[in-house]
Amino acid sequence: MHRSSETIGAIATALAKAQIELSNPEKTLTGTIPMRGGERSFRYASLASGLDLVRKCLGQHEIALIQTTAVDQGQITLTTLLVHASGEWVSSLWPVCAAAEPSAHIKGTALTYARRYALFTLVGIAGEDDLDAPEPFQAPQPPDPEPLVKANSGRVQSSRPLTLTSNESAILRDRLIEEIPGVPTEETLALWARRSLPLKNTLTAVDAQAVEMAYLAQLAACSDKHVSAEASPASSPQPGEGPEVAAAIAIPKTLRKRSKAHLAFVASQACLICRVTPCDAHHLKIAQPRSLGRKVSDEFTVPLCRQHHRELHRHGDEANWWANMQIAPIRVAKELWEKSQVHDISKRWVG
């Protein structure tokens, strides 16, 4: 239900100008809905990416965005309000879920779902695929770990796969762990993670952790091979070098490159998740073995906006976070390193 002030001329004019500048947010997530004969996959944009686009654009045209909740006749409702500097306003009212719902998780999920749809509808942007469009002929994308589906009751639910029994989980765990050593590069590891993520999400917590540890170990091994190939020292000391130099040459060392210019270049790029700027240059901890008090090499950095940068750190499991986003960050970091054209080793090599 839409409501508004007595006059809306000023806010309509400002909103029309804002809509010329607004673009649809990038659809980076994947969900599924049940249909006759199977399921239908669709892509959608997150609430966070939509808010980043809308707030900046509306603010430039003196329009404020407000979303509030209330309980009305046993139903939680969401009011989305656009207020112009003139005092004019328009709003929409959306039902969320029953106030008696005992699960706080379901309430929170339903509220996020309602906020996204109400916001996108009120400002006139599209944040999901057209589900009434013909089904494209292509391989289905792996589902998001927790896609949202709408049941017949209207309640937003999660389609997370059921956890396997202990015996079934152990069998699948062993199979996944056996596959990992045969994946030779960081890029193919990212593809493997994307393909295997739905399977890993059916494992018990202990078995899933075992798979993650094996994945991280293989990722570190691939990174070591890459670094050794780039910066392998001579196999024997030069004439006049003593035994200490020979020993140093014989022991490979993980080199960590530093370049402020490259970090500034990465920070100037668009966020890999929501495409906004400016960004932070995030160091990929999964790219090199851990070293006490030292970040990974600056060549392993990718652009993330402040919001997604914080989200990654809160998540904690970086490999799993990137797999959920269906992005191979190490490959992106390498491309940015080559593109930045800061390859004077004498100026940026730390070791």
Image (cartoon, rainbow, N blue to C red):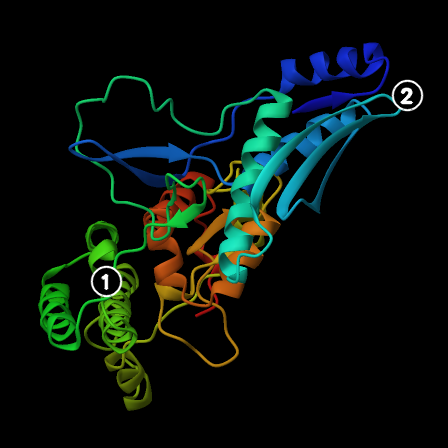
Residue 321 pos. (x, y %): 40, 57
Residue 214 pos. (x, y %): 22, 72
Image quadrant containing the C terminus: bottom left
Residue located beneath label 2 in the image: 86
Q: Is residue 132 above or below residue 312?
A: above
Instruction: Tell me the residue at 40%/49% (across/down).
Output: 157
Residue located beneath label 1 in the image: 200
Instruction: List the single residue furthest toward the right.
Output: 86
In this rendering, position of residue 324 left or right of residue 263: left
Residue 96 location, quadrant? top right
Residue 268 in sight here: no
161 or 64: nearer the viewer: 161
Q: Is residue 333 above or below residue 84?
A: below
346 or 48: nearer the viewer: 48
Q: Judge the density around disc 1: few (<14), some (14-19), many (≥20) Cα neighbours within 10 Å.
A: many
244 or 5: nearer the viewer: 5
Residue 251 in sight here: yes
State the separation of the CA atoms marked 1 and 2: 53 Å
Residue 36 location, quadrant? top left
Element under label 1? helix
Q: Is residue 322 above or below residue 41?
A: below
